[in-house]
Amino acid sequence: MSTGSRKKKSKLGAARSSTRTNTTGTTDAGQLQTKDQAQTQAQIQAPSSSKVSPETSGGAPIAEINNVSKVTKPVINPKPQRKSMRHCRTLSQKAVYGAKMENIRKKLMRKTVKQLEQLFSITEESDIRKQISKVRHIKMMTELENFEAQL
């Protein structure tokens, strides 16, 4: 799958380099364009001329215009929400996604552990006081029982 996308990129690179053409269809060096170059140039030029009404201009179909505009103008999306693993197609994508999610889980666990430690450090002092008071109470009760036993 990734090899196909590489080929597309190389074609676009060639198309971008061949956009320096005259209106007669010849490049600056005077050579005629190949079919691939002419098609890619037409696809690239079509969105700019047909942004207002792509259907009436008689250019490339809307689907091709949309595809080209996606390739030539990458839209920078804000940080996406967490996706499920269903969007991963290959095993390597799943592995990368799994590793990212594991890192996120570890970070969250670190935060929660720190928060818990802070809570426990605060409550430990009160727990110690409670335990001391319990021990004192137990000692007093045993002393009372011993005293009663002696009577």
Image (cartoon, rainbow, N blue to C red):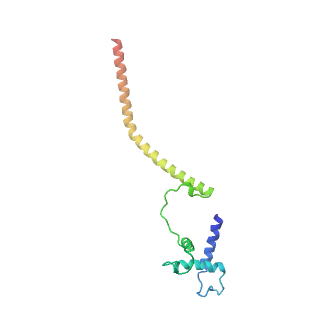
Q: Nearer the viewer, residue 85 or 148?
A: 85
Q: Nearer the viewer, residue 57 or 115?
A: 57
User: Would you place residue 130 above or below residue 7 in this image?
Assistant: above
The residue sitting at 54% across, 70% down in the picture is 70
Which quadrant of the figure has residue 59?
A: bottom right
The residue sitting at 33% across, 14% down in the picture is 148
Q: Position of residue 29 (x, y in %)?
A: 64, 86
User: Would you place residue 131 above or below residue 24 in this image?
Assistant: above
Which quadrant of the figure has residue 41?
A: bottom right
Identify the residue at the far top of this view: 151
User: Would you place residue 113 above or below residue 40 in this image?
Assistant: above
The residue sitting at 62% across, 57% down in the picture is 92
Q: Position of residue 50 (x, y in %)?
A: 52, 79
* Quarter containing the N terminus: bottom right
In the figure, is residue 1 to the left or right of 74?
A: right
In the figure, is residue 151 to the left or right of 77?
A: left
Q: How many marks?
A: 0
Q: Position of residue 79 (x, y in %)?
A: 48, 61
* Quarter containing the C terminus: top left
Q: Position of residue 58 (x, y in %)?
A: 55, 81
The residue sitting at 63% across, 74% down in the picture is 11
Q: Nearer the viewer, residue 68 or 95?
A: 68
